[in-house]
Amino acid sequence: MTALSEFTPDHPLADDDALLAFARFVHGDIRPRRRTLWFVLLDGERRPLPVIVPVDLVPDEPEVLAVNDLGQVWHDILQGEPGASVFVMLERPGTAAASITDHAWFVALRDTAARHGLTLAAFFLATADDVARLDQP
């Protein structure tokens, strides 16, 4: 696994280990008190663009219009960047076990990225207990 000390923000997130190291960097080993959705846009070489965006007051379940609007924002920013993708992390209080609503967020964001011509490079779930990749509904 890529060590956090080896993580360099302008390097490509080329494999699962690099993605996990990046997720742990963003999470910062905190104890979440509310749901926050973090996203980072990746260029065509899978390097993170220099902005990490937290979205607070995230509802338990994804709302169709809000999720679509988010996908449109991603598309507008990454327009003209072939191979661009999106890194997403859902941070929430509670146990590390993924819930039905965590999976609903994964599916909603994966699908909106696809509708807007983008790839969801990774979706992570972060709790006080763990940071883990969530890939399957």
Image (cartoon, grey):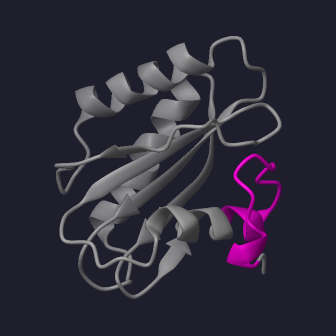
Residue 112 belongs to magenta span:
no
**Percent x, y for residue 72?**
44, 19
Residue 33 falls in which quadrant of the image?
bottom left
Q: Is residue 16 magenta?
A: yes
> Where is residue 108 shown, x and y percent of the image?
40, 43
Residue at position x 41%, y 50% in the image:
38
Q: Is residue 51 above or below residue 128?
A: above
Q: How many discs appear?
A: 0
Going 33% across and 33% down the picture, which residue do you hit? 67
Q: Quadrant of residue 32?
A: bottom left
The residue segment tinted magenta is 3-19
Q: Is residue 49 above or below residue 38?
A: above
Please name the residue shown 31% across and 73% down the image: 99
Tell me which corner region of the image, top left, top right, bottom left or bottom right, holds residue 60.
Answer: bottom left
Q: Is residue 3 left or right of residue 92?
A: right
Is residue 96 visible in this depiction of the protein? yes
Residues 51 and 87: in front is 51
* Front residue of this view, candidates 14 and 119: 14
Q: Residue at x 44, y 53 (%)?
A: 106
> Taking 72 as reference, is 55 left or right?
left
Q: Nearer the viewer, residue 104 or 119?
A: 119
Which percent across, then down, holds residue 65?
25, 26
The percent coordinates of residue 69 (x first, y second) are 34, 23
